[in-house]
Image (spheres, coloured by chain):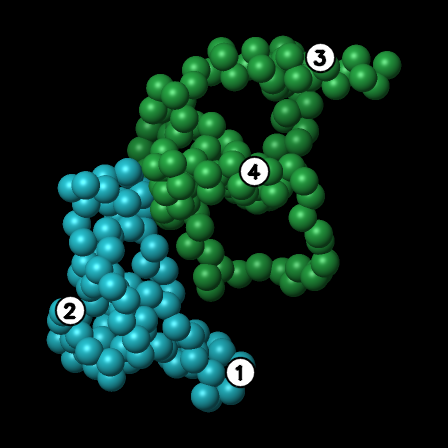
Chain colours: A green, B cyan
C-alpha cells in the first residue's frame, strides 16, 4: 500500500483500532527509561502469561494459499535457504503491529520474501513486477 | 554427554536477551526437573541468524515445571505440569541461584 494523503487517512483509521486511546505517546521520544527499553525489545512470540481477554474458539480449515505458503517455506528449508528458527526470528523482527496484525501464514510468506531478498536470491522490483503481473491477470479474468 | 541427567533439578537463568530467544519469560528463574534429553543442536540464538557451520552446539533438556510454581494465580490442579526445552547454557543446578 502506498501513502498518498487519502491512503494515509485510511491507514490512520485502521491503525487507530490497534491501540488503546490512552497510551504513552511513542513518537521517537528523545529519551526513554531502561524499563521501557526492555519492554520495547521484548521478543514478540513470547506471549505466555500475558493478560488477555477470552478468545472465541473457531474451527477454521486451512485455505489453499495457507498450505501453499507452508509448503513453499518448508521447501526453502529443505533446500538450505533458511530454517524455521530464522523464520521465527524474522517474524519477531516484523515489529508488534505487523506481527499481531497479519494472519499467521501471511507472517510466514512476508518473512520468507525478506529472507530471499536479504540473500540476493530475488529483488524487490522483480517481485513487485510479478505481483503486478498476477494482479493484472486476475483482474482481467474477473471482467 | 551433557551436564545434566534425567531427574536433576535445574533453574532457568534469567539472562538478558537481545532480538531473539526461545527461553520464555515465565520460565526464567523457575526451577524444574529434567525429564528427558535431546541431542546436541545449534543454539536458537545462532540458528535464528543463519549461523549454522560456526553455530554453537549444545545439548537440550526437557524440563518439567509445576504449573502452580510458574503462575502465582494458577487455579488448576496441584498435579498440573508444563514441559519446555532449553539449551544447556540456559540452565543451572537448582539451589545455585544468585540471591
Q: Residue at x 23, y 39 (%)?
A: B51
Secondary structure of the residue carrying numbered label 4 = helix
The residue beneath circle 1 is B76
Q: Marks 2 and 4: in contact by CB < 8 Å?
A: no
For the residues bearing labels 1 and 2, Cβ distance under 8 angstroms: no
Q: Quadrant of residue B3?
A: bottom left
How far across and down, in percent of the image, does residue B55 sit? 19, 45
**Mark 3 and mark 2, same subunit?**
no
Indicate which disc residue B49 carries.
none
Seen at 35% across and 19% down, the residue is: A120
The chain letter under disc 1 is: B
Dot 4 and dot 2 within a common chain: no
Residue at mark 4: A69
**Residue B41 horizontal/vertical position (percent):** 24, 55
Instruction: Give the number of the mark in front: 1 or 4.
Output: 4
Quadrant for the C terminus of chain B in the image? bottom left
Residue positioned 19% across, 58% down in the render: B58
Amino acid at each position: 500500500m502506498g501513502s498518498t494523503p487519502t491512503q494515509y487517512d485510511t491507514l490512520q483509521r485502521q491503525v487507530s483500532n490497534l491501540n488503546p486511546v490512552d497510551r504513552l505517546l511513542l513518537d521517537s521520544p528523545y529519551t526513554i527509561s531502561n524499563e521501557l527499553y526492555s519492554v520495547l525489545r521484548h521478543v514478540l512470540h513470547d506471549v505466555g502469561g500475558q493478560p488477555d481477554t477470552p478468545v472465541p474458539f473457531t474451527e477454521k480449515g486451512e485455505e489453499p494459499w495457507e498450505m501453499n505458503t507452508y509448503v513453499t517455506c518448508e521447501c526453502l528449508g529443505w533446500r538450505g535457504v533458511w530454517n524455521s528458527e530464522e523464520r521465527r526470528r524474522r517474524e519477531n523482527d516484523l515489529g508488534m503491529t505487523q506481527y499481531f496484525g497479519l494472519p499467521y501464514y501471511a507472517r510466514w510468506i512476508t518473512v520468507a520474501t525478506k529472507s530471499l531478498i536479504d540473500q540476493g536470491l530475488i529483488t524487490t522490483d522483480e517481485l513487485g513486477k510479478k505481483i503486478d503481473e498476477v494482479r493484472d491477470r486476475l483482474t482481467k479474468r474477473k471482467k | 554427554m551433557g551436564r545434566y541427567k534425567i531427574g536433576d533439578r535445574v533453574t532457568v537463568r534469567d539472562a538478558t536477551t537481545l532480538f531473539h530467544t526461545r527461553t520464555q519469560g515465565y520460565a526464567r528463574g523457575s526451577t524444574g526437573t529434567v525429564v528427558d534429553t535431546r541431542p546436541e543442536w545449534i543454539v536458537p540464538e545462532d540458528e535464528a541468524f543463519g549461523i549454522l557451520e560456526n553455530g554453537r552446539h549444545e545439548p537440550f533438556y526437557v524440563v518439567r515445571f509445576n504449573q502452580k510454581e510458574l503462575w502465582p494465580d494458577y487455579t488448576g490442579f496441584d498435579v498440573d505440569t508444563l514441559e519446555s526445552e532449553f539449551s544447556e547454557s540456559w540452565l543451572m543446578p537448582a539451589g545455585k541461584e544468585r540471591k
